[in-house]
Image (cartoon, rainbow, N blue to C red):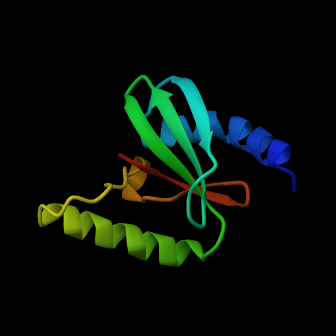
């Protein structure tokens, strides 16, 4: 799969992701070439600026567990990027065969 194909898949998934995470209109996106493991974008939306991550390297169940740990750390006032819950409270939204999550 090429980077262009993956970018096309993201563009197709953005309306679903925006609704699920309550982001409003996506006004801009920038692929972040530097990052570990997942594919990363900076999103400028009606609701603010976020990091969108496409899970590429681990099972989604493990990502959900790890994101729950971040929530617990944030509750203890430890400065960590907080995951944004989607409709229904899940931190990962699946579109097609891809899993995505958003960090604030």
Residue at x 64% of width, y 49% of height = 33
Q: Point out residue 86 in the picture as x, y percentages from the top left corner.
A: 42, 49
Work out whether residue 94 can be spotted.
yes
Q: Examine the rendered structure and indicate whether residue 7 appears above or below residue 83.
A: above
In the rendered structure, the answer to whether residue 44 lies left or right of residue 94 reads left
Q: Point out residue 12 in the picture as x, y percentages from the top left corner.
A: 73, 37
In the rendered structure, the answer to whether residue 37 lies left or right of residue 71 reads right
Most distant residue in the front direction: 34
Q: Point out residue 83 in the picture as x, y percentages from the top left corner.
A: 36, 55
Q: Examine the rendered structure and indicate whether residue 49 appears above or below residue 66.
A: above
Residue 7: which quarter of the image? top right
Residue at x 50% of width, y 78% of height = 62
**20 or 73, which lies in front?**
73
Work out whether residue 22 can be spotted.
no
Q: Point out residue 41 in the picture as x, y percentages from the top left corner.
A: 57, 43
Most distant residue in the left direction: 76
Residue at x 86% of width, y 51% of height = 2
Residue at x 62% of width, y 36% of height = 14
Quadrant that contains the C terminus = top left
In the rendered structure, the answer to whether residue 7 lies left or right of residue 45 reads right
Quadrant that contains the N terminus = bottom right
Most distant residue in the right direction: 1
**57 or 33, which lies in front?**
33
**95 or 1, which lies in front?**
1
């Amino acid at each position: 799969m090429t980077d262009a194909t993956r970018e096309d898949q993201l563009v197709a998934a953005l309306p679903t992701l925006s609704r699920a995470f309550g982001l409003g209109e996506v006004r801009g996106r920038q692929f972040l070439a530097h990052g570990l493991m997942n594919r990363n974008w900076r999103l400028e939306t009606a609701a603010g600026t976020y990091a969108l991550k496409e899970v590429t390297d681990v099972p989604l169940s493990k990502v959900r567990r790890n994101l729950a740990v971040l929530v617990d750390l944030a509750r203890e006032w430890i400065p960590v990027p907080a995951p944004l819950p989607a409709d229904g409270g899940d931190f990962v939204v699946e579109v097609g065969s891809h899993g995505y999550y958003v960090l604030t």
